[in-house]
Image (cartoon, grey):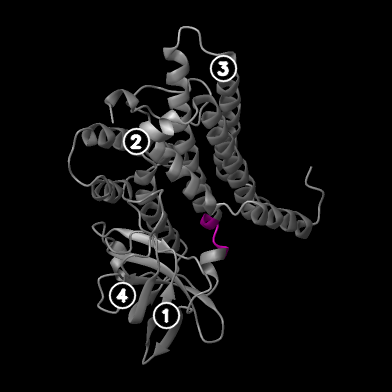
Amino acid sequence: MSNDTVTRVSLSPIPRHSGPSGTGIQTSLAVGYLHDLDGNSADPVALALELGRTLGVTATTLTDRWETLATLAAVDLALARAIEPHLDARGILDEARAAGEPIPDAAASSEATWGVFAAEGPVVPLVATFTDGSWSLTGVKPWCSLAGVLDRALITARTSDGQRLLFAVDLHHPGVTVPDGAWHARGLTEIPSGPVDLDAVPAETVGSPGWYLERPGFATGGIGVAACWFGGAVGLARTLFAAASANPTPSPFTLMHLGAVDEALADARRALAEAVAVIQSGDTNLDRAILAKQIRGTVARACETVMERVGHALGPAPLALDESHAKRVADLQLYIRQHHAERDDAGLGQALVEQGATPW
């Protein structure tokens, strides 16, 4: 990584880039971290988690939070992937505290690194059992990113009567096992996200039944992931722009692809900026779930357009010979699959029908 690649990713159209310093507290900290990372032989993910501890306790705006994630992702998507769940977990705990919901004593500590493990899959279900006045979790939880290196996690589990509750868990407990060799991905290789086995692991509730999915911040957190996707696409677009700018007479096809990439990124940026404005407007009629589906779908399609156009413009050479570019492509291809394509589009359609009123 070269320092000249460290440029803030902005959600504002003009100026698109404001130089390396940024404007928000978190974004400035992230840019400083990226400069310090250049040439550093230490584990970048470990350093990213250290940064996450700092970011998790700094006052910030929603714009600053998303620009921070995008700025990190534009340089290395794995860095944003490491930090985003920690920031999401801290946000969930802060939201629970502000709403008067129950939270664990460990939430007061700013030293722990956190994950959020809320996915469900066709495995042995994670079951929450209440015995002698306390909860414990037993079973398998899929898609647990960095479970082997994080300190704690917010984990969803089902009770015997089918309720889905959110719990805080100490990942250093001996009942927590992270199986080796489960992560075979070619993208985000630094962020193993395989299953975790839990055997009678003590757990503390976070929020009342149903609170986790019903809270206003649930949709906001989902859009934060899309900000990471956006940043990853910006990193690819910068490679294409550099190639086009380095050629005194770039091919008209290169210029065509560059223009299409700019249009796609502008769509994604506008969607994220509009989400900030709508969320912060305080509109009590806002359906945040629909908003999140719209924004995530828009950004995911923009990312796929960028990957396709950059691939067509640059051909196989950078995929085979440029390690940073090949990594960005592989990382982004995997990360945007958190958007479930046609299934999520169908979910948006269903939500619009259930809403009742014509949406346009």
- Residue 195 is left or right of residue 45, and the answer is right
Q: Which residue is mark 2?
A: 323
Q: Could you give the CA–CA distance between mark 3 and mark 4, rounded to whole angstroms?
A: 52 Å
Q: Which residue is mark 4?
A: 176
Q: Position of residue 28 (x, y in %)?
A: 32, 33
Marks 3, 1: nearer the viewer: 3
Please report whichever mark, 2 or 1, sits nearer to the chain's N-terminal start.
1
Query: In front: 220, or 293?
Result: 293
Query: In front: 87, or 121?
Result: 121
Q: Amino acid at mark 1?
A: Gly
Q: Amino acid at mark 2?
A: Glu
Residue 9 appears in the rendering: no
Residue drawn 40% across the image and 34% down it = 320
Give yes or no for contact between labels 2 and 4 (Cβ–Cβ under 8 Å): no
* Membership of 7 in magenta stretch: no
Q: Could you give the CA–CA distance between mark 4 and mark 1, rounded to whole angstroms?
A: 10 Å
Q: Position of residue 295 (x, y in %)?
A: 60, 44
| Magenta stretch, overall SS | helix
Quarter of the image containing the N terminus? Answer: top left
Q: Which residue is mark 3?
A: 255
Residue drawn 23% across the image and 33% down it = 38
Q: Which residue is mark 1?
A: 139
Specify few, some or many for label 1: CA neighbours under 10 Å numbering under 14, 14-19, or 20 or more: some
- Residue 319 is left or right of residue 298, and the answer is left
* Membership of 215 in magenta stretch: yes
- Residue 279 is left or right of residue 154, and the answer is right
